Amino acid sequence: MNLKSLSGADPLAHDETRRQLLEAAGGVFAEVGFRNATVREICRRAGANVAAVNYHFGDKETLYAEVLRHSQQRAFEKYPPLMGVPADAPPEEKLRAFVRSFLLRIFDDGSITWFGKMMSREMVEPTGALDALVAERLQPMADLLRGLVAEILDCSPDDEKVRLSCFSVVSQCVFYHHCRTMITRLFPEQRLDASVVEQLAGHIARFSLAAMKHLPDLKTPRSKPVLAARRRR
C-alpha cells in the first residue's frame, strides 16, 4: 500500500505539507518556546488542518525535536565549523574559523536564527530533545574545539585549563546573542549583524589566543601577594 492510498493525498503534497509544518513550527518555537507553542497556531501558520501535526509527526514533542534537528542541520550545512579551512592549517587559524562560523550562525537573519533562539531556550528550560542534539551535534563540536585548544596549549585535551579555555571562547561568542538587547542599549553605535562578524571573530580569536599564551599551570599554587609581602618584612 502506497502513501497516496494511506493519506488520500499525493506524495508530493504530503512532503510539502510536512515541510510547511516544519517551517511554521520553527518560527513558533523560536518565538514562544516549546511549552507555550500550540499545535493550533503551528497548523494555522502552515495552512494545514489541525490534525496534520499528529499525522506527520505523531505529537508536538516529536515535531519540536525534528524542528531542532532540522534547523541545526541547515545551520551547520551553511556555516560548517571550520568554514573550509584546510586540515593541515595551524590550530590558531582553525580557532578563528570556528569562532567565525559560530558568529555567522548567530547573526544569520534567515530561518537559521531559529536554531540559536531555540537553543537559548533549551539552556534555561531543557526538553527531552536536548540529549539527542548534544549526542549528535554538540558533543562533536565540543570535542573539536577541545582538540584545537589542546593543540594550541600543547597539553592533553583532558587538562582542566583546556576545558576552561573552551568555556571562555564559547562564552564570548554567545554573549553577543544572549545580551544583544542590552548591548544595543548601552552602545547604540554597535552593530550586531553579519557585517561585524569578521571584526568580532578576529577580536575573540586574538583575545583568546593572547590569554592562552599566559595561562599559569593550575597545579602550581601562587603565593598570595599579602603573604609574600609579609615574608619580605
Image: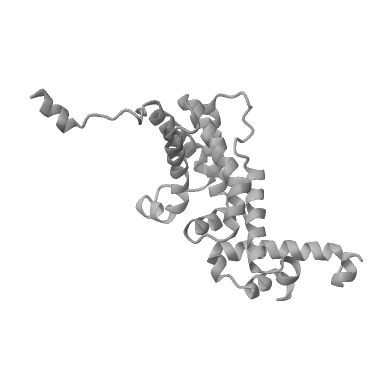
Which residue appears at 37% of the width and 29% of the height? 215
Res 43 → quadrant: bottom right
Which residue appears at 47% of the width and 26% of the height? 155
Q: Quadrant of the N terminus?
A: bottom right
| One can see residue 26 in this view | yes
- Residue 23 is situated, as x and y percent measured from the top left of the image, at 67, 61
Res 14 → quadrant: bottom right
Q: Quadrant of the C terminus?
A: top left
- Residue 134 is situated, as x and y percent measured from the top left of the image, at 58, 49
Q: Residue furthest right?
A: 1
Compare residues 95 and 132 and report the one nearer the observer.
132
Which residue appears at 90% of the width and 70% of the height? 5
Which residue appears at 76% of the width and 66% of the height? 17
| One can see residue 191 in this view | no
Compare residues 233 and 190 and report the one nearer the observer.
233
- Residue 229 is situated, as x and y percent measured from the top left of the image, at 13, 28
Task: Report the side of 134 relative to 160 (left or right).
Answer: right
